[in-house]
């Protein structure tokens, strides 16, 4: 009745757009190097993200085991994606700290922090808000209280 725990051989972190996992780089080489079934991952990932918009980046942490099996965990999109959506911009400032690319409100910061709390449940919402505000600053997005 004693079951042996599988030995973890690799942990692979990727960011793939929703529904767009293909055997081409970066997915194929990363999984192939670990000896995993690339098409199995691509089909499963695409099926699970089929209901999301194709431009949404989805961070994935893939754990490869010694018997060539794998598990993966999908996380929420990066903070930069949420900030760009809230500010309605394509990219941040070319000169953060000197030029302002856009403005977002504190309410947007709080909403982003609530969504990101799913990935880091042990952090307080206040700490996540400060982290999101710091990302805004590094992108050249001004936070306004309104």
Image (spheres, helix red, strand yellow):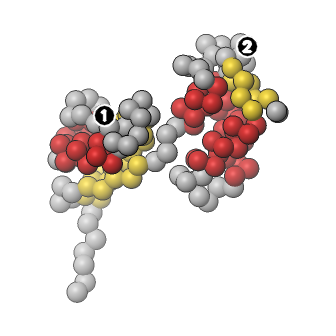
Q: Viewed as shown, does residue 146 lie left or right of 17?
A: right
Give whichever of 20, 100 is nearer the camera: 20
The total of numbered circles placed on residues is 2
Instruction: Give the labeled residue for mark 2.
Output: 98
Q: Is residue 12 visible?
A: no
Q: What x and y, as percent, mark residue 131?
A: 67, 41
Determine the image quadrant of residue 90: top right
Q: Viewed as shown, does residue 12 lie left or right of 143?
A: left
Q: What x and y, as percent, mark residue 134?
A: 69, 34
**Residue pushed farthest front?**
51
**What residue appears at the point 30 percent right and 56 percent down from the top-left corner?**
71
Q: Viewed as shown, does residue 20 lie left or right of 34?
A: right
**What residue appears at the point 19 percent right and 48 percent down from the top-left corner?**
40
**What residue appears at the point 33 percent right and 42 percent down from the top-left corner?**
50
Determine the image quadrant of residue 86: top right
Q: Viewed as shown, does residue 86 lie left or right of 7?
A: right
Above or below for 50 versus 145: below
Q: What element carries label 2?
A: loop
Instruction: Give the labeled residue for mark 1.
Output: 20
Quarter containing the C terminus: top right
Determine the image quadrant of residue 31: top left
Above or below for 78 versus 11: above
């Amino acid at each position: 009745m004693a079951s042996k725990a599988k030995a973890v051989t690799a942990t692979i972190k990727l960011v793939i757009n929703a529904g767009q996992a293909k055997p081409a780089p970066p997915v194929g080489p990363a999984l192939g190097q670990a000896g995993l079934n690339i098409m199995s991952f691509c089909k499963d990932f695409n099926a699970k993200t089929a209901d999301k918009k194709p431009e949404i980046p989805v961070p994935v942490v893939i754990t490869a085991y010694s018997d060539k099996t794998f598990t993966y965990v999908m996380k929420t999109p990066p903070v930069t994606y949420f900030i760009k959506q809230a500010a309605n911009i394509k990219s941040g400032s070319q000169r953060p700290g000197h030029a302002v690319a856009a403005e977002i409100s504190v309410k947007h910061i709080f909403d982003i922090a609530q969504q990101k709390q799913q990935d880091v449940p042990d952090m307080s919402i206040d700490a996540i808000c400060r982290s999101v505000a710091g990302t805004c600053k590094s992108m050249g997005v001004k936070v306004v209280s309104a």
